[in-house]
Structure formats: C-alpha cells, structure tokens
C-alpha cells in the first residue's frame, strides 16, 4: 500500500471514528437530558478542534514522518500489497479504542465524548501529511510503500522508483 494512501485512510478512519463516537455521545446525552454534560462536550470538542488545527497547520511533513521517509530502504520491487490487512495491522489501536469507548458509552456518555475529541485531534493533525509526502515523491521521483510488519513493531517504508514531475514555468523554460 502506498504511504500516501495509508495517510489518507488514517485521516478518514479517525474522522469516521469521531463521527461514530459523536453520534453515540449526542444520543446518550440527549436521552439523559444532562446540560452539564452537553456544555462539557461542546467545550472539549472545541478545544480538540483547536488543538488538531494547530498541530496540522503546516504544509510540510512533521518530524516523525520525515524521519520515517529518510529511513526508508530502497527497493526495486514492491512489498506485498494487502491494503485491508495492512490497515487493520496498523490502525488496530484506533479500532480498539473506538470499540471500547462505544461499548462503555452505553453506560457513561462521557467516555465516547472524550474519545471523540482525541479522534478529532488525530484527523485534523494528520490532514495535510498526505499532500506533503506526495510533494516529496514528485520532487524525488520515488514512491513510498508501507512494508508489512508486526502490529507491535514500528512502521517501515520501502522507497521504490516512481515518476518525477518536471515543472515548467510560464515562459516554457523548465524550472
């Protein structure tokens, strides 16, 4: 699986988890008619949006992704392509925390409300990383792929040949 596709999927999965958690929270808070909880939810989600927006404000790669790209090993062949198992292998903490928060939310709506805020932060903080990695791939003429590893080991990338984009200026001369 290409790394840019993995990053895009990670943002969408975080946003989907936040949506599911927010839905359960709103339904539970509405059924309980707890005004203090509603104020807490609005406040926490507002803070989460501000934190996520602040963390994801830059258009360049963040330092952990930059280190990951720099440590990618070069290869002329692509790693095994199984996107669904790779996503499950890498995103299991998000899946586990979402399922636990949804289950516990049936008894205490505060739990999915808090988990939703963290999912919002994750989605907003990572939203521009895919574009930054794409820019690096186009500049260097490579493609980064996620290498299948153990779910408990750090993620590893493979650097494979890709297509380089040649930019042309307004007057037709290459830049």
Image (tube, rainbow, N blue to C red):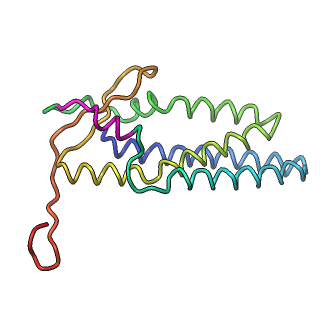
Q: How many marks?
A: 0
- Name the residue: 52% across, 29% down: 92
Q: Quadrant of residue 168?
A: bottom left
Q: Is residue 157 above or below residue 44?
A: above
Q: Is 70 a magenta residue?
A: yes
Give coordinates of residue 150: x percent, y percent: 40, 20
Outermost residue to the bottom: 171
Is 104 on the left-hand or right-hand side of 164?
right
Of residues 8 and 175, the one nearer the viewer is 175
Q: Quadrant of residue 145?
A: top left
Q: Quadrant of residue 79?
A: top left
Outermost residue to the left: 173
- Name the residue: 57% across, 47% down: 16
User: Range of the magenta residues?
Assistant: 65-74
Give coordinates of residue 165: x percent, y percent: 17, 58
Give coordinates of residue 67: x percent, y percent: 35, 36
Is 52 on the left-hand or right-hand side of 37?
left
What secondary structure do most residues of the magenta stretch adopt? helix
- Name the residue: 72% across, 40% down: 112
- Name the residue: 41% across, 49% down: 129
Give coordinates of residue 125: x percent, y percent: 52, 49
Is 41 on the left-hand or right-hand side of 150?
right
Is 135 on the left-hand or right-hand side of 111?
left
The quadrant of the picture occupied by the C terminus is bottom left
Q: Is 24 a magenta residue?
A: no
The quadrant of the picture occupied by the N terminus is top left
């Amino acid at each position: 699986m290409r790394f840019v596709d993995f990053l895009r999927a990670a943002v969408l999965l975080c946003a989907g988890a936040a949506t599911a958690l927010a839905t359960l929270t709103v339904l539970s808070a509405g059924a309980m008619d707890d005004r203090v909880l509603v104020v807490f939810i609005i406040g926490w989600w507002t803070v989460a949006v501000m934190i996520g927006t602040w963390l994801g404000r830059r258009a360049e790669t963040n330092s952990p992704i930059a280190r990951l790209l720099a440590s990618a090993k070069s290869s002329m062949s692509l790693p095994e392509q199984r996107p669904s198992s790779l996503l499950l292998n890498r995103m299991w903490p998000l899946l586990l925390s979402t399922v636990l928060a949804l289950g516990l939310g049936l008894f205490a709506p505060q739990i999915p409300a808090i988990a939703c805020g963290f999912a919002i932060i994750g989605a907003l903080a990572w939203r521009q990383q895919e574009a930054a990695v794409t820019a690096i791939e186009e500049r260097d003429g490579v493609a980064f792929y996620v290498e299948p590893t153990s779910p408990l080991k750090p993620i590893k990338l493979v650097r494979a040949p890709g297509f380089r984009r040649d930019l042309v200026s307004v007057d037709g001369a290459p830049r």
